[in-house]
Amino acid sequence: MLNLEPLRIVLERSGLDALVLVPGANFRRVFKQDFHQMERPLAVIVPRDGEAMAVVPNLEMGSFKPLGFPGKIFDWRDEAGYMGAFMAAGAALPQLGKGSRVGVEGQRMRVFDLFALQAALPACSFVDIHAEISSIRLHKTPEELALQRKAIRISEDALEATLGEIKVGMTEAEVESILLRNLFSHGADGLAFAPIVAAGDNAARPHAHARPDYRIKPGDALLFDFGGSYHGYSADITRTFFVKEVSDYDRAFYETVLAANAKGREVSRAGITASDVDDAVQKVLEQSQFAEFRRHKTGHGLGLDVHEAPQIMRGNMQILEPGMVFTIEPGLYRSGEAGVRIEDDVVVTEAGIECLTSFPRDLRLVG
């Protein structure tokens, strides 16, 4: 039988009367299974008191019923539409009347899902408690960390294999295709996100796309930001290389980012805030000759989602605690010329941090 107690704890802490989960990372954390978000809505309503309700497309019942859902299931077929199931679920929740407040995942729920809930529970008000619900994923279990380590190891092996195949004159898109092949051949069962493979001036775009018509040449920065996933858990790694040669200026540029990355790993530990980590990292960049080329915060949480809490940025006073996993990824970007980012994944421990990534960070020439 599934355990919905973590969600009821969220309800107690937030003072709400119910919450709603839709497919996504929080759903997967509770139900241990992923469901696609398509045109067919699937929603689980968990009241603070009483039985939970699930609205499920009939074609998903073969996957949903074995989960052992501890509540009532209202399934619906395409020809009938989903509103009847939502209305039936709402009628089965008489405790959610006038003045009741229902929390939803504001960063995940779609507008038509919300409209269906509002029609089924017309006396309720709906509030965004995405952060509160997502807090159930803040502290990774040993089992989760094992899956994340596997995703990272697969990704690092794939990167090393890819570097051995790179040649001057390849396009960014060709390098990307090699990386993708190596990720899956080394054991990834999915992608954490669409990889970034960017050379030269494209590396100065933090969220670049691989170009099919740009051929890498000596002196180019070559940036990889990528990650395979394994059983839903993500790696997120960035390494920047230089093709064949590197100028003294670019070497100093690289070494500045490397120093900022090292500072982030040095200061991170339980008991300090996410803001403290970012502040230490940003000061390394700000006090360098390259301060004008800063663009972003130090990092973000990592798990079932590639970007989740805690956000490692100035002003976020969240205390770091054992079991939290996040990235340390300072970068510098000279628009129209080059960019460098070095990203590691770390987990907070009782003794400090464990760096889950082990791929070398020293400047390396490829091609």
Image (cartoon, helix red, strand yellow):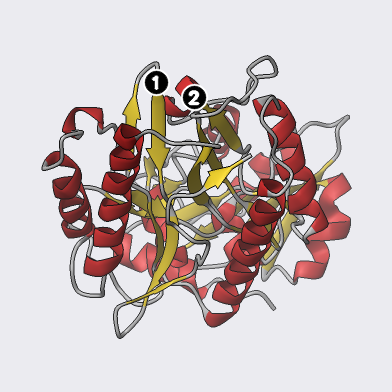
Residue 38: x and y in percent read 73, 34
Along the horizontal axis of the image, is 31 left or right of 20? right
Mark 1 crowdedness (10 Å alpha carbons): few <14, some 14-19, many ≥20: some
Percent position of residue 132, x then y? 37, 57
Give whichever of 166, 112 is nearer the camera.
166
Secondary structure at badge 1 equals loop
Q: Residue at x 16, y 55 (%)?
A: 280
- State the residue in front, 54 or 281: 281
The disc at residue 200 is 2
Label 2 Cα crowd, 10 Å radius (few <14 / some 14-19 / many 20+):
many
Q: Amino acid at mark 2?
A: Gly
Question: The N terminus appears in which quarter of the rendering?
Answer: bottom right
Residue located at (75% from left, 48% from top): 56
Reading the image, the residue beneath label 1 is 337
Q: Secondary structure at mark 2?
A: helix
Residue, x 70% and y 47% (percent of image)? 162
Locate the C terminus and report the quarter of the image it occupies. top right
Q: Nearer the viewer, residue 74 or 2?
A: 2
